[in-house]
């Protein structure tokens, strides 16, 4: 009852030793000035690790290693469905080992919310949650995972689910998204800077799929963060031409921390 790694060997290294070295290098090289407190939530990208890994590391370098539960909200890229899909498996696997699922929480969500559906099919080949797991495995001591895959849904529906799993200091929320896709570098920088400004200002309604593939999850997170009186801090903003790609057709990435400061 495990979901095997779907994109190991393509989006990130399949060899565990190489993967550890790569992630640890990103964490060492890309840690920005930390927020005044450990973030309650982070927004981080999910592309091929050589492209978005440094930006994701800018967020993960500051998470509390003692948390025991991680909620990861990612957009569905491959299988269309309505609502928020949760898996029925007992663990998600990566080359670094198995990540146990918080099954009791998922059972509660499917019982309480009509928009939450138990369905392994959208999760099977999806990368938007999987890309975060190796970073979490290197940054957090031990944790259970609450994987929430967002299909055709609204920010309000996502916020409702996040409120139910928000928890306290034991819980970290991760929202998975990339920013603009396939613009020339100067145009991407302009669009992504504007998008980052909207996110920091909590203006989730200004987002759409052209600005961020995971915009619905971001909308839900911003709504829940606002209800908790939390603020958003930009940690890193770059695109693929600044990490490992060409400048003519880039993908944008950003990381943010949601904290009480």
Image (spheres, rainbow, N blue to C red):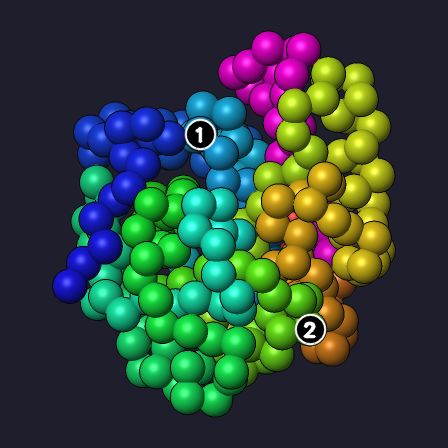
In this rendering, would 244 be left or right of 256? left
Residue at the image position 72 percent from the left and 40 percent from the top: 210
Residue at the image position 39 percent from the left and 68 percent from the top: 86
Crowd class of label 2 (few under 14; some 14 to 19; many from 20; radius 10 Å): some
Residue 253 position, x and y percent, is 62, 34
Pick whichever, 235 or 75, lies toward us: 75
Which numbered disc flags the more N-terminal residue, 2 or 1?
1
Residue marked by disc 2 = 156
Residue marked by disc 1 = 48
Residue at the image position 66 percent from the left and 11 percent from the top: 247
In magenta, the rendered stretch is 232-253
56, above or below 240, in the image: below
Residue 115 position, x and y percent, is 53, 76
Residue 245 position, x and y percent, is 55, 14
Res. 35 in view: no
Indicate which label's residue lies in the foreground, 2 or 1: 2
From this viewpoint, which residue is outermost toward the bottom? 112
């Amino acid at each position: 009852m495990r979901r095997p790694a779907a994109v190991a060997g393509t989006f990130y290294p399949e060899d565990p030793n190489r993967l550890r070295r790569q992630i640890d290098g990103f964490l060492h090289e890309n840690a920005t000035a930390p927020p005044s407190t450990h973030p309650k939530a982070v927004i981080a990208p999910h592309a091929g690790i050589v492209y978005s890994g440094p930006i994701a590391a800018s967020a993960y370098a500051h998470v509390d290693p003692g948390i025991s539960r991680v909620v990861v909200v990612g957009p569905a890229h491959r299988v269309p469905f309505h609502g928020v899909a949760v898996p029925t498996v007992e663990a998600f696997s990566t080359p670094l080992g198995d990540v146990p699922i918080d099954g009791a929480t998922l059972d509660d969500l499917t019982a309480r919310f009509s928009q939450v559906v138990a369905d392994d099919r959208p999760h099977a080949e999806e990368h938007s949650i999987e890309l975060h797991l190796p970073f979490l495995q290197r940054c957090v001591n031990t944790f259970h995972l609450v994987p929430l895959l967002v299909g055709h849904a609204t920010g309000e529906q996502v916020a409702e689910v996040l409120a139910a799993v928000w928890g306290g200091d034991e819980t970290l929320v991760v929202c998975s998204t990339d920013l603009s896709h396939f613009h020339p570098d100067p145009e991407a920088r302009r669009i992504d800077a504007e998008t980052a400004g909207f996110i920091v200002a909590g203006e989730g309604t200004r987002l759409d799929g052209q600005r961020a593939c995971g915009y619905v999850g971001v909308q839900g997170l911003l709504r829940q963060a606002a209800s908790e009186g939390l603020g958003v801090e930009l940690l890193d903003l770059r695109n693929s031409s600044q990490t490992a790609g060409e400048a003519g057709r880039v993908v944008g990435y950003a990381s943010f921390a949601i904290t009480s400061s």
